[in-house]
Image (tube, grey):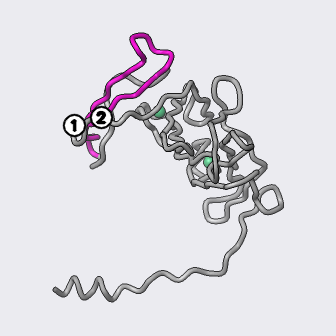
Amino acid sequence: MLQAAAALAIEPPEFAAEQLIQADGSDLQVDAYSVPEVADWDADGLADLIVGEKFSTSLGKVRIYLNTGTAAAPVYATSFYAQAEGAELTVPASGCLGVFPQVTDFDYDGRKDLLLGLADGRVQVRINQNTDAAPLFGPESYVQAGLPGSGQRQLRCPGNPGGGRLQQRRTARPGTGGYGWQGPRAAG
Ligand SMILES: [Ca+2]
Ligand SMILES: [Ca+2]
């Protein structure tokens, strides 16, 4: 009862006046429909900005703004685009979404990968085929939903023999309290 009362007494957060993030000396602005995420892209200990954009009527791209300042006072340089298979990574865009990027180690190999939310509702996976500090991504695959509660999922990898379907099982990550996926990787 006392805990419930204490929870009700929590004050809502108050925010300072808005400010626009600066990059290379001016307001950071992508082509359209920015979708930002904060992640340490180059593994130097400083959080960087990863921004999805609608590049054109039918294409979405992912821009990277490296932090050249400090953790407490980030300074962002000019951007570059995430690369996949030797070119700029692009996804199909539509309406008000270019791409919704999420940086995560999807195959749990210690190197960051990209999960990309698409305008058509699918979730694309791009596995990092280079180092964690200089990510370069392989071909696309898509998250497959398994049976509800089964703890299993299928990944579709177009270039993989045998129909391109790979099965992974959800397992506990020792010592982390979290979960990961074990089994064949989508690409690599
Ligand atoms: Ca960084
Ligand atoms: Ca990985």
Q: Residue farthest to the left?
A: 1
Contact? badges 1 and 2 (CB < 8 Å):
yes
Image quadrant holding the N terminus, namely: bottom left
Q: Which residues are magenta?
A: 152-175
The residue lying at 64 percent from left, 23 percent from top is: 85
Q: Position of residue 173 (x, y in %)?
A: 29, 40
Tell me if residue 173 is in the magenta stretch. yes
**Is residue 20 found left or right of 159 in the rendered image?**
right
Q: Is residue 70 above or below residue 87?
A: below
The residue lying at 78 percent from left, 49 percent from top is: 78
Say few, some or many: other residues with alpha carbon within 10 Å of mark 2 (under 14 / 14 to 19 / 20 or more): some
Residue matched to label 1: 150
Quarter of the image where one finds residue 58:
top right
Quarter of the image where one finds residue 140:
top right
Q: Position of residue 170 (x, y in %)?
A: 27, 36
Residue matched to label 2: 146
**Is residue 85 found left or right of 13 in the rendered image?**
right
Q: Position of residue 35 (x, y in %)?
A: 61, 54
